Image: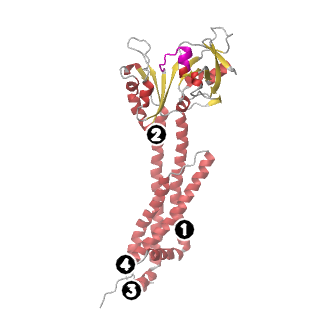
Amino acid sequence: MASLSPARLRLSDLLRLGGYGLRSRPLRAVLSALGIAIGIAAMVAVVGISTSGQADLDEQLDALGTNMLTVAPGRTMFGDDATLPDDALSMIKRIGPVTAATAVGTVGDTSVYRTDRIPEGETGGLAVVAAQLDLPGTVNARLAGGTWLNAATARYPAVVLGAAAARRLGDVPAVWIGGRHYSVIGVLDSVALAPELDTAVLIGWDAAKSYLDFDGHATRVYTRSVETQVEAVRGVLAATANPQNPDQVDVSNPSDALIAQRAASQTFNSLLLGLGAVALLVGGIGVANTMVISVLERRAEIGLRRSLGATRGQVRTQFVAESLLLSLLGGLGGVLGGYTVTVIYAGTQQWPPVVPLWAVAGGLGATLLIGAVAGLYPAIRAARLAPTEALGAA
């Protein structure tokens, strides 16, 4: 006589069984899912709000130049002013973590006047500075009016005024420099990262060489680096800019804002881990409680299923599936709720709303893991019930 083998539960059958268990007690299922949703929503909202706040903080700190270093010539061993080699800028650009680099060069003792009628002694303390074309992008300089130098105007008598220089010179179409009129083609806003540019009259590198006998040596190099590598870049800048005499190069220290940024990031991460763990623990306890009560109330159903041929494994799988479905519903609701809270709160604070993908995926993954763990004990308990015992206790 051939032995009978129990029918296998297909995935669709398993989902129907799990859904039936939840539909048979909708209020309890909703309340349990709500408990999970609140926990996951709290975690996602905390992550989202914290990340949004951190993104806003990063924007503000980036404006302070947390990853900017400057290189300038120092002094020789005899106390004279040193100079940077002609290839200093190109060498610095070859440093791997350096994302941008540009240079300016002070043009001797050249003075700037509103017109050729101004006495020579009334210089106004303005400096003529030769500038590379990529200077604004590197130092976050913005134009208050006009245009920046380009490949054409950088070769001709044209200048861009710094914010303070423009206030001192007034609204003039041209300035008088070295016996020649130079057209004013633009005016910069105040440059927070490089305040020395505010009192500068900026001219193209080639034009400075052609008209003002500029020697072509950079007097300051501005660099931007990968934030995690700023200290490492600083360590090699002097030797890279002047390999033969690195002691004749002055390199600025990393901004204090970079330290503040890293401290804020570490604080946010600790906060997220702590609150996320509490939220997940609360959700897991809610699922486990719901499933244990469900087993106690459904002893008759379990006994009937067992007497009709359901194996212990099938009963165990059924209750684990119910637990997973319950957790998944709560997790989906929690992710949606947490995202909504983040967007609303970030909008009130004028922050960029940011919900990391890992928080969404982690929230859903955590709910499934919690559902499986929380439903495992009730499922094992249900599977161990003998049919006669379960029917007799009903």
Rendered image quadrant of residue 157: top right
Residue drawn at point x = 39 percent, y = 33 percent: 232
Question: Relative to residue 304, is residue 37 drawn left or right?
Answer: right
Q: Marks 4 and 1, how far apart in space? A: 28 Å
* Disc 1 target residue: 31
- Secondary structure beneath label 1: helix
* Label 3 or label 4, whichever comes before in sequence order: 4
* Label 1 or label 3, whichever comes before in sequence order: 1
**Magenta stretch in the rendered image:** 207-218
* Disc 3 target residue: 388
Q: Marks 2 and 3, how far apart in space? A: 63 Å
**Extreme left residue here?**
1
- Give the amino acid at mark 1: Leu
Q: Marks 3 and 4, how far apart in space? A: 14 Å
Residue drawn at point x = 60 percent, y = 17 percent: 126
- Decide: few, some or many residues near mark 4? Use Cα within 10 Å; few <14, some 14-19, many ≥20: many
